[in-house]
Image: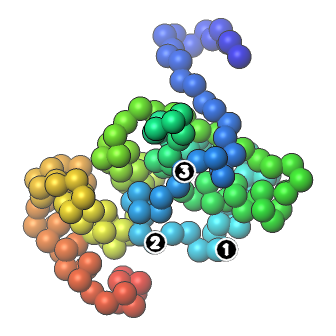
Amino acid sequence: MSMKLNAGEVGRQDLFSILPECIIRDDADNSRSTTHTPAEGEALARSILKHGQQTSCVVRRIELDKVQLVSGFGRNSAVAYINAHLNPKSPVKLKCMVVDCSAEEAYERSIAENLDRAETTPIDDAHAQRRLREVYGWDDERIAALYDCSVSYLHTGRKLTRLEKPLQDAV
């Protein structure tokens, strides 16, 4: 669809409608370690049915013309829930923006989106920071720059990841 806008200089950004089951999803790539509760997921699903999807998911191209989820794990789950439980005869597709990036850049995008939306907990941040160190080889200075915090603050997060799971959940 082509559109002419009287809105100054605008760029083109292609959005695609994709069934959630056609998107490769690896929950390890979600920078949130605490996912939505079932009640939150169902509430988001009902909101999407009523008002539509307000924010596009981001997917990245991978081999063989497939796409992998970068951000929007909650939206992906909500639409999958809609298609399985609320509207199985007329499946809903996810609005997705397709980007070209590496797995590392995709993870950084996931963190940035969650930080922008202020939807992370200290535990989420600590686990994401650990993954940046262990999987992608980031040093503390680079992580601190991404999170706009001090290196000493990161050491507190490291301590959180060493707590037993029930204590992490309490944080």
- The residue at 68%/12% (across/down) is 2
The amino acid on which the numbered mark 2 sits, given as a three-letter code, is: Thr
Q: Are marks 1 and 3 in contact (CB under 8 Å)?
A: no
Depicted 33 relative to depicted 2: above or below: below
Q: Quadrant of residue 128?
A: bottom left
Looking at the image, is mark 1 or mark 3 nearer the viewer?
3
3D distance between C-alphas at marks 1 and 2: 14 Å
- The residue at 67%/12% (across/down) is 3
Seen in the image, is 171 located left or right of residue 145? Answer: right
Query: Of the numbered discs in the image, which one, if any, rests on residue 24?
Result: 3
Mark 2 neighbour density, 10 Å: few (under 14) some (14–19) many (20 or more)? some
Depicted 132 relative to depicted 162: above or below: above
Q: Quadrant of residue 105?
A: top left
- Secondary element type, mark 2: loop
Instruction: Look at the image and tell me in which quarter the C terminus lies.
Output: bottom left
Of mark 1 and mark 2, the one earlier in the sequence is 2
- The residue at 54%/24% (across/down) is 13
x then y, percent, for residue 142:
15, 50
- Secondary element type, mark 3: strand
Q: Are marks 2 and 3 in contact (CB under 8 Å)?
A: no
Identify the residue position indicated by label 1 in the image. 39
- The residue at 86%/49% (across/down) is 90
Identify the residue position indicated by label 2 in the image. 34
x then y, percent, for residue 104:
30, 47
- Secondary element type, mark 1: helix
3D distance between C-alphas at marks 1 and 3: 24 Å
Of mark 2 and mark 3, the one earlier in the sequence is 3
x then y, percent, for residue 141:
10, 53
Front-lying residue, 150 or 15: 15
Of mark 1 and mark 3, the one earlier in the sequence is 3
The amino acid on which the numbered mark 3 sits, given as a three-letter code, is: Ile
3D distance between C-alphas at marks 2 and 3: 20 Å
